[in-house]
Image (tube, rainbow, N blue to C red):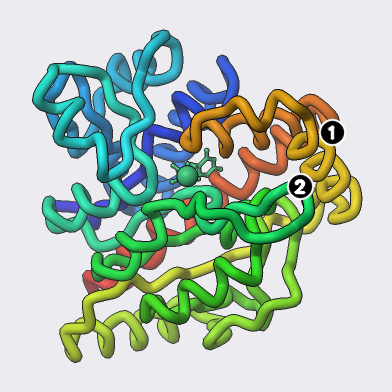
């Protein structure tokens, strides 16, 4: 069996618009194969767990109305009721770990949200808690730029999540290249990452390792423009009417509406890059 890499479906159903979501679903899988891995796009199809979606199933996640965003709280409900469920990072790593898959790739992880005044809110992603108790390695571009980055970074520390920077000393912030927050360790080679993953496993430590890679510089969005857009979207009366799980898709689409194609391209570029890096790691871990 080739080294497997888990990919999520929330980014397809709720993170990206059609047809960019379908193209990304395919290209991320292609990136994994190019590096010698086997892509496993995880989701719930008509109540059944799919540890690796077919192309037709992947397209259903991209096109169908009413695909539920599935985190831990509603995972058993959607399965019991036969629904379509697009899995977030939290649900994806839970299911991947159960299936023996050790590496996952995504764009940005969820974290602690902020209000229009920039203060942390009670809306905290279950991504954080599940990262604290699921010993996989997640390749991402850091927490999403829409979050309270300092509170999120502190919480990762509290959860015992090891934060690695891929060729960087500072935690990336999704489509913005970098945040002012330091990672726990910088890794310049895959072998360094492998050594750290092996130590975590040998010590039987419960938490995930986050390998964070900055968006390729050519695609990075200007920090100030992104911040201004997020600030405006959070102050909009529409924001106060959202259910908590609707906040992330709302903010991501607000950034796309203002910054246009560039925001979409940046998101896709970092997702594809992370899929490649995750596959390199999965292959190296099997050696
Ligand atoms: N990465 C992206 N776009 C996304 C996500 C990740 O580039 O939409 C998804 C992931 O599934 C992550 C979720 O788990 O956003 C976080 O949602 P929330 O803040 O509601 O927990
Ligand atoms: Mn939330």
Residue 286, above or below 230: below
Rate crowding at label 2 as few (under 14), some (14 to 19) or many (20 or more) other CA atoms within 10 Å: some
Q: Position of residue 285 (x, y in %)?
A: 27, 72
Q: Is mark 1 within 8 Å of ligand 1?
A: no
Q: Position of residue 139 (x, y in %)?
A: 46, 61
- For image coordinates 37% across by 76% down, the residue present is 159
- For image coordinates 68% across by 56% down, the residue present is 215
**Closest to the observer: 95 or 104?**
95
1 vs 2, front mark: 2
Q: Quadrant of residue 174?
A: bottom right
Q: Position of residue 241 (x, y in %)?
A: 61, 25
- For image coordinates 87% across by 52% down, the residue present is 222
Q: Quadrant of residue 98?
A: bottom left
- For image coordinates 22% across by 76% down, the residue present is 206
**Closest to the observer: 128 or 86?**
128
Q: Quadrant of residue 282?
A: bottom left
User: For the residue labelled by badge 1, is the local secondary structure a helix, a strand or a loop?
Assistant: helix
Res. 116 mark: 2
**Closest to the observer: 48 or 3?**
48
Res. 259 mark: 1
């Amino acid at each position: 069996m080739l080294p497997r890499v888990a990919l999520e479906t929330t980014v397809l159903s709720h993170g990206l618009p059609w047809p960019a979501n379908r193209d990304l679903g395919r290209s991320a899988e292609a990136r994994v194969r190019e590096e010698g891995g086997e892509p496993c796009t995880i989701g719930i199809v008509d109540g059944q767990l799919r540890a690796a979606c077919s192309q037709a199933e992947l397209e259903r996640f991209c096109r169908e109305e009413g695909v539920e965003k599935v985190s831990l709280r509603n995972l058993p409900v959607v399965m019991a009721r036969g629904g379509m469920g697009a899995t977030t990072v939290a649900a994806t790593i839970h299911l991947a770990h159960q299936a023996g898959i050790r590496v996952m790739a995504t764009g940005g992880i969820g974290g602690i949200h902020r209000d229009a005044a920039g203060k942390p809110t009670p809306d905290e992603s279950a991504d954080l808690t599940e990262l604290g108790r699921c010993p996989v390695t997640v390749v991402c571009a850091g927490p999403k730029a829409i979050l309270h980055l300092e509170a999120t970074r502190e919480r990762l520390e509290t959860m015992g999540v090891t934060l690695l920077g891929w060729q960087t000393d500072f935690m990336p912030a999704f489509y913005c290249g970098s945040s002012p927050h330091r990672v726990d360790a910088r890794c310049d080679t895959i072998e360094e990452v492998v050594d750290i993953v092996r130590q975590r496993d040998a010590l039987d430590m419960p938490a995930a390792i986050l390998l964070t890679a900055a968006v390729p510089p050519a695609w990075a969005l200007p920090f100030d423009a992104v911040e201004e857009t997020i600030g405006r979207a959070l102050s909009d009366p529409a924001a106060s009417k959202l259910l908590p799980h609707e906040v992330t898709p709302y903010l991501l689409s607000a950034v796309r509406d203002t910054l246009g194609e560039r925001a979409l391209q940046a998101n896709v570029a970092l997702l594809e890059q992370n899929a490649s890096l995750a596959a390199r790691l999965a292959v190296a871990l099997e050696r």
